[in-house]
Image: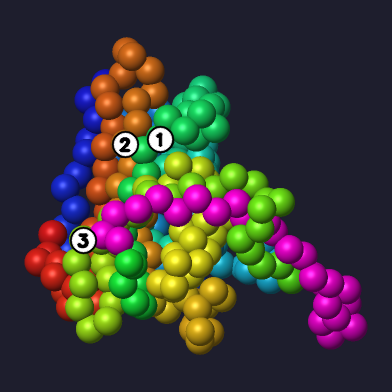
């Protein structure tokens, strides 16, 4: 196996609008490719799969990555719609199963970048706060629907995030985050809990923002499918909507 790992390059165009992710655009976002998996750079603002009223999602475009006459790759995990960056896809049934096992065992190393409002008290630290999903029923146009949110709660599931401040500027901080667990909205809720909600946070910050503006990047992933396979490492470039804020905090580009 000869992996095709790519060095991130600055984006040359704006993020594609929903419904306009062409085959060429998706293929240009491939960061790593081998016979078992892809790692792609998911654009912010695009859900990974259909849910609720979402009609435009990444799974619609995965056939663009299939071999002629072959099956498209499948999601090995999820990223929030508003999160950009590294997303792993399985190309074979064994590869998909193996990736699921590695995620469950914590054997996939994930690193995130974020720009947060405010600056943590310590330059490095561990956020250890259990998280609970709270579901609230509500009425929507006469149909019974429910909404949910994630809250720190001792009764919730264990959730641990390591963080490091990489730079600061204009009252904001550029953070490197390494989640030890994979709870829904974990990084977003943990950052808000220490008084540093992410820039563009649509739910857990002081202001609601439109999708696609959240300053959260799945910066890199690293894993090894098995001893007989070479290690996989992929790094996603900073998306266009985060670059000015990162630069203000000391980032000097890719």
- Residue 193: x %, y % from top left: 50, 67
Asked if marks 2 and 3 touch (Cβ < 8 Å), the reply is no
Q: Dot 2 surroundings within 10 Å: few (below 14), some, or many (20 or more)?
A: some
Q: If you read the primary sequence from the N terminus, does the residue marked by circle 2 or circle 3 appear first?
A: 3
Q: Is residue 8 above or below residue 120?
A: above
Task: Judge whether 201 appears above or below 47 on screen.
Answer: below
Residue at image mark 2: 222
Read off the magenta span: 122-146
Using a 10 Å C-alpha cutoff, classify the residue at mark 1 as few (fewer than 14 neighbours), some (14 to 19) or many (20 or more). Answer: some
Q: Relative to the observer, which residue lies in front, 31 or 174? A: 174
How much space separates mark 1 and mark 3, taking CA atoms? 22 Å
Residue 3 appears left or right of 40: left
Residue visible at 13% across and 70% down in the picture: 250
Lower position in the chain sequence, tag 1 or tag 3: 1
Q: Which residue is mark 3?
A: 166
How did the renderer colour the structure?
Answer: rainbow
Q: Give the distance between the C-alpha atoms of the residues marked 2 and 3, in whole angstroms.
A: 20 Å
> Does the residue at mark 1 contact the one at mark 3 (Cβ under 8 Å)?
no
- Work out whether residue 243 can be spotted: no
Judging from the image, what secondary structure is the residue with disc 2 in? strand
Task: Give the mark nearest the N terminus, 2 or 1.
Answer: 1
Front residue (pair 95, 155): 155
Between circles 2 and 3, the one closer to the viewer is 3
Label 3, residues with CA under 10 Å away: few <14, some 14-19, many ≥20? some
From the image, tell me which residue sits under label 1.
108
> Could you tell me which residue is drawn at 45 percent across and 54 percent down?
127
Quarter of the N terminus within the rendering: top left
| Quadrant in the rendering for residue 26 | bottom left
For the residues labelled 2 and 1, say whether their Cβ atoms are less than 8 Å apart: yes
Percent x, y of residue 202: 52, 78
**What percent of the width, then of the height, locates residue 39?**
35, 43
């Amino acid at each position: 196996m000869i992996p095709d790992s790519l060095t991130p390059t600055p984006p040359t165009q704006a993020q594609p609008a929903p419904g306009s992710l062409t085959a060429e655009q998706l293929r240009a976002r491939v960061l790593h490719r081998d016979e078992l998996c892809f790692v792609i750079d998911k654009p912010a603002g695009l859900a990974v799969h259909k849910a609720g009223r979402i009609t435009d999602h990444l799974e619609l475009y995965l056939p663009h990555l299939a071999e002629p006459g072959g099956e498209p790759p499948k999601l090995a995990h999820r990223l929030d719609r508003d999160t950009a960056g590294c997303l792993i896809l399985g190309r074979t049934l064994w590869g998909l199963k193996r990736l699921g096992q590695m995620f469950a065992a914590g054997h996939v190393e994930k690193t995130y970048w974020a720009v947060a409002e405010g600056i943590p008290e310590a330059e490095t630290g561990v956020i250890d706060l259990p998280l609970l999903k709270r579901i609230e029923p509500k009425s929507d146009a006469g149909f019974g629907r429910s909404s949910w949110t994630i809250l720190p709660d001792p009764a919730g599931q264990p959730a641990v995030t390591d963080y490091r401040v990489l730079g600061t500027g204009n009252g904001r901080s550029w953070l490197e985050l390494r989640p030890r667990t994979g709870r829904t909205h974990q990084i977003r809720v943990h950052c808000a809990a220490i008084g540093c909600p992410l820039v563009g946070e649509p739910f857990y910050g002081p202001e609601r923002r439109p999708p696609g503006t959240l300053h959260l990047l799945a910066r890199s992933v690293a894993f090894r499918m098995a001893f007989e396979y070479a290690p996989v490492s992929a790094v996603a470039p900073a998306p266009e909507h985060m670059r000015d804020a990162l630069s203000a905090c000391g980032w000097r580009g890719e």
